[in-house]
């Protein structure tokens, strides 16, 4: 990242009126939430079962107690707060310059920063539902219980509204995300390696002028981008003015 990169991004953002941000784990690492796939992340921890097995639908149904032990320990970061990236994206929306955020993250930090139009492809830890009667429960409700949380109305198990392995994305969220991306004049892809599908495939719906990638590592979409910036998303966007 250098001065020319920031100047180029500022010029693109100044000329854009329908910006969409597409975000991944790299946006939240600056808030203290580990990237699933880095050397310190979820996929490299030692447990009785591989993490990708634990956060699968079949495992949740077969052993919800072990699922929730892992889930509370490694997927909930209740002290995390929005960083400069989240705040800048919310600022662009408040100014009427952004159509919203399409995110692969489940932490709810975009909303906490003030973003209203957020399309959570993989769900969110802030929402939980009874597997039988569909009664809603907050994150606080989950944390106040120990072991497997059960519905106060019917006694059935409560499940986080996050998309586990073996589960499909929500069709309504998909349609809204695709429609939003297709309307954008600028798509800013931030903090994602673009290896998780079908989410990564959503970039194919972009028909606007400027594709910008902000990420620490190389991605499959770099060659087709108008601007590629190697850096932390918060550090980059904190240097951009909304004007």
Image (tube, rainbow, N blue to C red):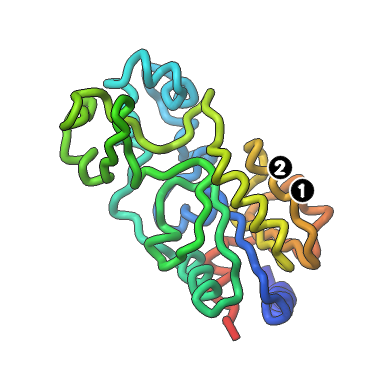
Q: Position of residue 81 (x, y in %)?
A: 35, 60
Relative to 97, residue 165 above or below: above
Name which residue lies at 57% across and 81% down: 242
Q: Which residue is mark 1?
A: 204
Relative to 132, residue 124 above or below: below
Q: Are marks 2 and 1 in contact (CB under 8 Å)?
A: yes
Q: Residue furthest toward the top?
A: 62
Question: Quick check: 124 left or right of 173?
Answer: left
Most foreground residue, 86 or 111:
111
Label 2: element kind:
helix
Mark 1 packing: few (<14 Cα in 10 Å), some, or many (20+)?
A: few
Q: Position of residue 8 (x, y in %)?
A: 74, 76
Name which residue lies at 33% across and 29% down: 70
Name which residue lies at 63% across and 54% down: 216
Question: Quick check: 67 left or right of 106?
Answer: left
Name which residue lies at 75% across and 56% down: 206
Q: Quadrant of residue 149?
A: top left
Label 1: element kind:
helix
> Which labelled disc corresponds to residue 81?
none
Q: Position of residue 73 (x, y in %)?
A: 30, 35
Q: Position of residue 202 (x, y in %)?
A: 69, 46
Relative to 112, residue 175 above or below: above
Q: Which residue is mark 2?
A: 201
Question: Quick check: 52 left or right of 65?
Answer: right
Q: Residue furthest toward the right?
A: 223
Q: Quadrant of residue 109?
A: bottom left
Q: CA distance from mark 2 to mark 1?
A: 6 Å
């Amino acid at each position: 990242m250098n001065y020319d990169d920031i100047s180029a991004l500022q010029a693109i953002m100044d000329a854009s009126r329908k910006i969409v941000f597409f975000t991944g784990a790299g946006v939240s690492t600056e808030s203290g939430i580990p990237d699933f796939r880095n050397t310190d992340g979820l996929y490299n921890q030692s447990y009785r079962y591989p993490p990708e097995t634990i956060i699968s639908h079949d495992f949740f149904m077969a052993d919800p107690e072990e699922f929730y032990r892992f889930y509370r320990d490694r997927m909930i970061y209740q002290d995390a707060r929005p960083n400069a990236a989240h705040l800048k994206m919310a600022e662009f929306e408040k100014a009427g310059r952004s159509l919203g955020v399409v995110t692969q993250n489940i932490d709810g930090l975009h909303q906490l920063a003030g973003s209203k139009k957020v399309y959570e492809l993989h769900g969110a830890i802030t929402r939980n539902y009874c597997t039988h009667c569909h009664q809603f429960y907050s994150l606080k409700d989950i944390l106040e219980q120990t072991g497997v949380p059960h519905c106060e109305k019917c006694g059935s198990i409560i499940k986080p509204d996050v998309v586990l392995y073996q589960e499909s994305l929500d069709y309504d969220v998909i349609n809204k995300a695709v429609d939003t991306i297709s309307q954008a004049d600028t798509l800013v892809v931030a903090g994602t390696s673009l290896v998780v599908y079908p989410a990564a495939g959503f970039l194919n719906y972009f028909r606007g002028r400027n594709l910008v990638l902000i990420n620490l590592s190389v991605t499959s979409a770099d060659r087709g981008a108008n601007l590629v910036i190697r850096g932390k998303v918060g550090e980059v966007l904190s240097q951009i003015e909304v004007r």
